[in-house]
Image (tube, rainbow, N blue to C red):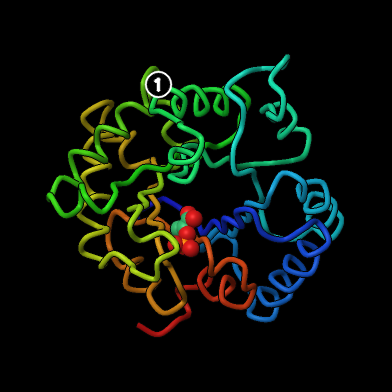
Amino acid sequence: MAGRVPLMAGNWKMNLSHIDALGCLQKLAWTLADHHYDAARSECVVLPPFTDLRTVQTLVEGDRLPIRYGAQDVSPHDDGAYTGDISADMLVKLGCTYVVVGHSERRQYHGETDEIVNAKARRCLAKNLVPIICVGEGLDVRKAGDQVAYTVAQVRGALAQIPASAMADLVIAYEPVWAIGTGEVATPEDAQEVCGAIRATVAELYDAPASEAVRILYGGSVKAGNIVALMAKPDIDGALVGGASLNPEEFAMITRYYDLPM
Ligand code: PEP
């Protein structure tokens, strides 16, 4: 993990209205402050629904909270007749730092292909937003033992035409689909196997400095009880957290994983 600041990103998915967001974020900030949270040791990020972003911006900026935030999706287009879409410029104006692209739920329910994921990632980078590019295999692929080849192919597709210089401003989240929201977490060894292969792929596509700069997260039923063992693995630089991020106390513990017992 040398030189890479761990990142704990809470994907709220389609949960919490802008009113609920206030309470959740305040509780998260208070809990972190109570425990002398140090942002240099791990970055705390929330990814609320679009409708919460203005409220989150107001609270984070007004109270100078040590929390960054972002969106769960972005349009690959600049502007125009794309009903229902949200542009990167709009997210920049709302103070977003991060954007999730290619989450398995968007790939599954909205037909997002590697090409679309790549276009969205490039749009983010063009606007100085950090894309969190999600990749990961389904249960059938895992059962066939093809998880590395499958995930690496997704990474190659997502990184097409993206230069080596962008790797420090880009995050890849390995999220095996069978572990998302199921309570079934990949073992640290399983997660490391694929995260290590992702880093090796970045080295192969670019060079060693690029592969050392890119942050690779694990996602899939992460909780306070399993984060420490995951973070002990050399190629896991943080977590993309779904369900557990809706509980501010638990998410604060995950963020401060370094204070938790092994
Ligand atoms: C996710 O939605 O990205 C996720 C990892 O969800 P959960 O932590 O609930 O498995």
**Above or below — where is 157 with respect to 143?**
above
Which of the 4 image quadrants contains residue 201? top left
Residue 228 drawn at (x, y percent): 37, 73
Question: Is 136 positioned to the left or the right of 132 in the image?
Answer: left
Count of numbered badges drawn on the protein: 1
Q: Quadrant of the N terminus?
A: bottom left
In the image: residue 73, left or right of residue 106: right
Residue neighbourhood size for the residue with mark 1, other residues' Cα within 10 Å, grouped as few (<14), some (14–19), many (≥20): few
Q: Residue furthest left?
A: 145
Residue under the point 37% across and 27% down: 159
| Residue at the image point whose x is 28% and y is 34% from the top | 202
Q: Amino acid at mark 1?
A: Pro
Query: Quarter of the image holding residue 82?
Result: top right
* SS state under label 1: loop
Front one among 69 and 139: 139
Image quarter (top left, top right, bottom left or bottom right) of the C terminus: bottom left
Q: Is mark 1 within 8 Å of ligand 1?
A: no
State the image coordinates of residue 26 (x, y, percent, origin top left).
77, 69
Which residue, as the protein is rendered here, is positioned at the far front?
A: 109
Q: Residue furthest top?
A: 80
The residue tagged 1 is: 163
Residue 228 visible somewhere in the drawing = yes
Residue ID at (87%, 55%): 62
User: Of all residues shown, which one is farthest toward the bottom?
Assistant: 261
Residue 116 horizontal/vertical position (percent): 46, 24
**Residue at left offset 41%, top offset 59%:** 180
Q: Position of residue 205 (x, y in %)?
A: 25, 26
> On the rendered structure, is 22 left or right of 154?
right
Any part of residue 6 in sight? no
